[in-house]
Image (spheres, rainbow, N blue to C red):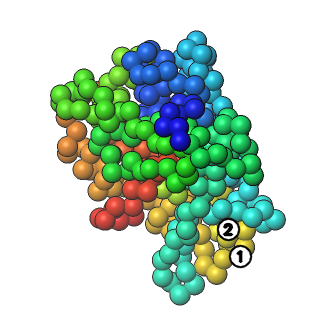
Amino acid sequence: MSTTAALRILSLGAGVQSTTLLLLAAEGRLPRLDAAIFSDTGWEPAAVYAHLDRLEREVARPAGIPIYRVSAGNIRDDALNPEHRFASMPLFIKNQDGGDGMTRRQCSNEYKVKPIKAKVRELLGCPHPTPVPRGLFVEQWIGISRDEFGRARDADVQYMRNAFPLLDLTGGADGMTGWTRDDCLRYLRAQGFESTPKSACIGCPFHGNAQWRRMRDKHPEEWADAVAFDASIRRGNANGKPLLGEAYLHRSRLPLDQAPIDRVTAHEWGKQQTDIFGQIADIELEEGDPDGCSPWACRSGRAVEPGDAA
Ligand code: SF4
């Protein structure tokens, strides 16, 4: 059985870590990539699509690395279409009895992971339902930095083997093996990519207060879009069936335009107390939230912290 990958691909979430990997491969500091795959939910902020276009134009194409954009549909449209079988978003629920709940997150698997797997099978010449022969696999790079190494996981299919090149890099600020997110930010700044945005759906319920504030204050059209969506899902269209309670995007379980997003959460406050890295800390403080939705290591799940009262 072959132990050599047929292809080396990057799962390109277009956030800090995966952008760093693409730039390092294009520069020749990491081995050559055969392709990068971006899985599009159709509801990313404009800044993410602009960043992706720039990466393709200035980095990937000159280096001969094709970027494949794949999609399982538009998550916003599907959520509001009662006829569509919808993989649910993690919505905050106010139950009829007054208790709190949350819907199960199925969206990242449906809208991010599945389209990547389908593309990988196609690249291997075995589109579903053609079986993938044993021993035929791709090496899939995933952007996991040392500060989040616990999110590194093996692939759950035999035709993909995950690799985490950031964990093996040297040259980070503290001299230890493995780059941290701050090392990636330093590198991106030096390469002129300090504007790398977070990749997550505009209306992701895992946004923390800082991210909602930033959207409201800097991207009013996206904020209006999220507020309108929030109002539309109150009775449960986002699950494709009526809800017994009410659904909300903000953890306070208040309409988004009334939610207390100006409150600094415990997570943000903790960042303010511990960051010591000058300009990099400024980026962190401005964002103040986890790093968005990666197909294989969703970082969004930390928005609700113990002590992060609404
Ligand atoms: S960003 Fe949020 S809503 Fe979008 S796929 Fe990820 S978890 Fe789901």
Q: Disc 1 beta carbon < 8 A from ligand 1? A: no
| Image x and y of residue 157, in percent | 56, 52
Q: Which residue corresponds to the image point at 73% horizontal and 68% vertical from the top-left?
A: 240
Residue 174 appears anywhere in the view: yes
173 on left or right of 150: left
For the view shown, which residue lies furthest in the bottom direction? 97
Return the residue nearer the eye: 217 or 64.
Answer: 64
Residue of label 2: 239
Residue of label 1: 242
For the view shown, which residue lies furthest in the front direction? 1
For the view shown, which residue lies furthest in the top direction? 62
Q: Within the image, what quadrant is residue 54 found in?
A: top right
Q: Amino acid at mark 1?
A: Pro
Dot 2, crowdedness within 10 Å: few (<14), some or many (≥20)?
many
Q: Within the image, what quadrant is residue 58 found in?
A: top right
- In the picture shown, does residue 85 fall above or below 43? below
Return the residue nearer the eye: 34 or 112.
Answer: 34
Return the residue nearer the eye: 61 or 281.
Answer: 61
239 on left or right of 257: right
Q: Amino acid at mark 2?
A: Asn
Q: Distance between the Cα atoms at labels 1 and 2?
A: 8 Å
